Image (cartoon, grey):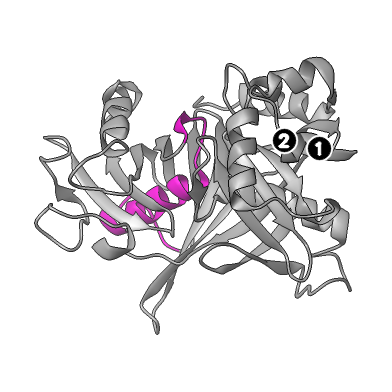
Amino acid sequence: MITLEKVQGSGNSFFLLDQDLLPSALNENELSRLALALCPRKTGLTGGADGILAVTASPTPSIHVINADGSQASMCGNGLRTVARYLHDHYGFGQEGKRDTIDGSFHVSTLNANLQVRSVGNFAPGLPAYSVEISPVSFDSRSLPFTNLGRNRLINCSVPELLPDLRFTALSVPNPHVVSFMTQDQVQSDLLSSLGNRLNSPNPYFPNGVNVNFAHILGRNTLYVRTFERGVGLTNACGTGMSAASLCLVLTHPQMGEANQEITVYNPGGMVKTRVHYQEEEGTYTINLIGNATVTHLIELDESCLYHPPAQGSDLEKKKAKIKETAENTAYQDFVAKLPYH
């Protein structure tokens, strides 16, 4: 038997699988099949999720992110916070005097970088919080990639090929993103779904698809962000998307966003804090993403179900899985209910 944790950061939900507990780690194809079984919202386990976080602690901490559609993601900021908590709680990383800890922080390997993570206490009563590094950042078209838009960089540019009357910034963090600032009504309209579906279907501009973020400036260092996530669709929150939008705020609206200052980012699933840093000598940016790392369910099931999942994850719920909802889920809902922008 093995226990999966269902976790969420800012409403962005995942199944967390500790590969070190298995007799043999699931390979990429097996993880993809598992995601297709567990994650669909209508037929998945416990109402589905946005993806799977495959974690290893040995020889070094690492995370492998599989989207709900079975594709691989470079990184996931909201998911990384929950992985940081799991490694802290179960393996001692980040605890004083233990496991590669420096000043309470440690590093987790992702597809493109080793990223610093650390506990920051509670985000709200009963809600442990973590800060995670979001990097590397690039504006080069090859890092996304994008093409057929007549330039190698898009920074606050009019791009009529995407949508008229809006300006876009394209960047990788390292997940590929486009960000546009607009009115709250536009953010909540069907434009996001329409553009997100178009750019994540065969198209001449973003051949590998792209995460699309619509943002509204609520005030100084305060944003509302809604995301169409590549491989997922409309989502409660996207950690790298909120980080990308925060950097774009600092770059394109400097009167409203400041580097090295805390930025509050609201989203359909809750709220996070970010902090944008500029490394002048290197000419590079990094972002800290700070928010909840919440365990909502503990799911006990036979290991064989992971290697050979049923066609529908809900079949596990009916027959083979023992599921326990945690008190943290209620604490998070109470926290969200009190937010001014939700």
The amino acid on which the numbered mark 1 sits, given as a three-letter code, is Ser
Residue 46 rendering spot, x and y as whole percentages: 71, 22
Rendered location of residue 43, percent (x, y): 61, 18
Residue at the spot of label 2: 308
Please give the name of the residue rendered at 20% of the width and 56% of the height, measured from the top-left corner. Answer: 154
Mark 2 vs mark 1, CA separation in Å: 6 Å
Query: In the figure, is residue 224 to the left or right of 5?
Result: left
**Viewed as shown, does residue 288 lie left or right of 192?**
right
Q: Residue at x 49, y 33 (%)?
A: 267
Kind of residue indicated by mark 2: His
Give the residue pinned by disc 1: 304
On-image quarter of the N terminus? top right
**Relative height, residue 88 to residue 96 (above, below):** above
Q: Farthest residue toward the bottom?
A: 281
Q: Nearer the viewer, residue 146 or 116?
A: 146
Q: Quadrant of residue 78?
A: top right
Q: Residue at x 51, y 49 (%)?
A: 72
Residue 12 percent across, percent down from the top left: 58, 35
User: Where is 100 relative to 126, above or below?
Assistant: below
Q: Which numbered marker is on residue 54?
A: none
Q: Position of residue 243 (x, y in %)?
A: 46, 51
Dot 2, how many residues are within 10 Å of its Cα: few (below 14), some (14-19), or many (20+)? few
Q: Is residue 262 above or below residue 68?
A: below
Q: Which residues are magenta?
A: 232-259
Q: Is residue 212 within the magenta segment?
A: no
Q: Is residue 245 magenta?
A: yes
> What residue is at 63 percent from the left and 29 percent from the top?
37
Residues at badges 2 and 1 in contact (C-beta under 8 Å)?
yes
